[in-house]
Image (spheres, rainbow, N blue to C red):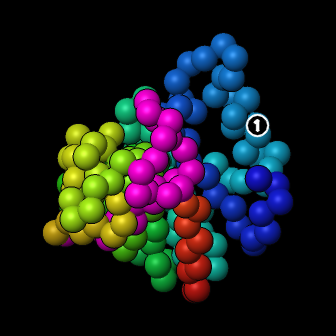
Amino acid sequence: LSWMKSPLKLAVLGNWERKTRKWLPSNAIERGYKNAGFQLLINRSLNFRGIQFSGVEDFRFGFPEIPEADPEAKFRCLISHNPDIIGKCSPEKLAGYQLALCGHTHGGQIRIPCFGAIRTSSVYWKRFEYGLCTCPGKPVVSVSSGIGATYIMKRFRCPPEMTLISVHG
């Protein structure tokens, strides 16, 4: 990932990075991100050109704490591997954030026309399946299908993606 050219490269850790494995421990993954020029946002914020980016720990295997929104920031973006945190948190806890960037569901991996995902790894099933999602009183959520797969290492009508989002402050 060091080939990616950007004035700012941010990352949060997901469930696979947080699972304890002898062959690839979390601290080795964290070092890899840092060596590739990424800044890990684990329950902390970073302000860049008037934009607040806040990252949280993984919802299932970590201890996510949403940083307080900076009222001075022009725009506030929450980054979480798992979108379920948006459903679980109160509107008050998410107050001030305009956008949440998430993944984890893989877009369902297997999608049927006119229905979408037949399964997602979300406790909210189709609510945070893929794409833009809205919840009253909460930030808009963008859920990417990502590049990985889980359980069944195949995709159907759900191509892998890397989303490029440009935020101009």
Count the marks: how many? 1
Q: Which residue in the structure is indicated by mark 1?
A: 31
Q: Is 154 on the left-hand or right-hand side of 17? A: left
Q: Position of residue 47 (x, y in %)?
A: 59, 69
Where 68 sits versus 156, above or below? below
Residue found 25% across the figure and 46% down from its top: 118
- 30 in magenta: no
Compare residues 42 and 60 and report the one nearer the observer.
Answer: 60
Q: Based on the displayed image, in which of its 4 quarters is residue 122 positioned?
A: top left
Residue found 76% across the figure and 46% down from its top: 34
Residue found 64% across the figure and 79% down from its top: 49
Compare residues 123 and 18 and report the one nearer the observer.
Answer: 123
Q: Based on the displayed image, in which of its 4 quarters is residue 28 positioned?
A: top right
Quadrant (top left/top right/bottom left/bottom right) for the C terminus: bottom right
Q: Where is residue 141 in the image (x, y as percent from the top left)?
A: 35, 65
Q: Magenta segment, principal secondary structure? A: loop
Residue found 48% across the figure and 41% down from its top: 154
Of helix, strand and loop, which one carries label 1? helix
Q: Is 82 on the left-hand or right-hand side of 136? A: right
Q: Where is residue 147 in the image (x, y as percent from the top left)?
A: 56, 51
Boundaries of the magenta span:
137-160
